Image (cartoon, helix red, strand yellow):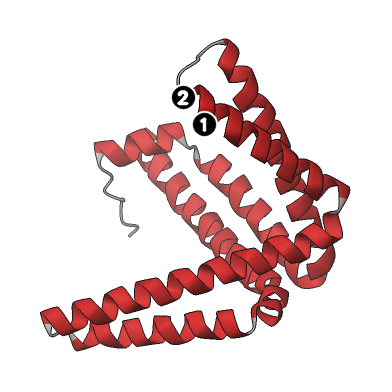
Amino acid sequence: MAETPVISETDMMDLKLFPWWLLMVWGILALLIGVAFFMTPGMTTVLLITFLGAYWFVGGLFSLCSLAVDKSNMGWKIFLGIINMIAGILILIYPFYSTIVVLSFLVIFIGFWAVFIGVSHVVQAFTAKDAGNGVLGFISIIFGFVLLINPFISAELLPFIIGAFAIVFGLSAIVFSFTAKKCVDAVKA
């Protein structure tokens, strides 16, 4: 005998906002992107960074155009709009060099973030006498230093890590879409 899924009213609202088939499409796209990162990591990464450059350029244009409607925070909008447009143009002109720079910057940022989070976990572990938090803190610090010592090697591995996450997310979204479809069908019945 099949179990009828129990679904709350909030979950039902979520299913109406994000239908199961949209989640399925999202999962399939994520799965395809993940496979693309494994099959052609260099080309896929350059394409992703080029898309990011176009996004930043258009975002900068919209930021400047928004001043015609809303003049609040004018200085920040002008500054961010110009910076976004310059970054977007540089990425679009030099996509291969930009890929190396953006990935390296991202790895360095993640490395510093991991060290900072790790130190805060260790401090919290000593104040709260929590060994688990301390272990997580030390692991985070080691991870951060590994990234900071070898940022270019880490940047080369980043497409594979992104690909793995995309595949896991895609598969999870596809499986969840089937669960969501069962819930919708059960409520309709």
Q: Where is the C terminus found, in terms of image quarters?
A: top left
- Counting from the top left corner in percent of width and height, residue 84 is at 66, 39
- Counting from the top left corner in percent of width and height, residue 52 is at 70, 47
Vertical relation: 44 (above or below) 12: below
Disc 2 vs disc 1: Cβ atoms closer than 8 Å?
yes
- Counting from the top left corner in percent of width and height, residue 19 is at 49, 37
Question: Neighbour class for label 1 at 10 Å: few (<14), some, many (≥20)?
Answer: few
Question: Going 71% across and 78% down the picture, which residue do you hit?
Answer: 152
Residue tagged by mark 1?
A: 76
Where is residue 61, by image quadrant?
A: top right
In this view of the protein, can residue 189 be seen by the observer?
no
Vertical relation: 183 (above or below) 159: above
- Counting from the top left corner in percent of width and height, residue 48 is at 74, 54
Instruction: List the single residue furthest toward the top.
Output: 69
Where is residue 188, by image quadrant?
A: top left
Q: Amino acid at mark 2?
A: Asn
Q: Amino acid at mark 1?
A: Trp
In this view of the protein, can residue 141 be seen by the observer?
yes
Residue tagged by mark 2?
A: 73
Question: Going 55% across and 28% down the picture, which residue do you hit?
Answer: 77
Question: Going 45% across and 87% down the picture, which residue do you hit?
Answer: 142
Label 2 and label 1: CA atoms lie apart by: 6 Å
- What is the tally of numbered marks visible in this picture? 2
| The one of 27 and 71 positioned closer to us in this rendering | 71
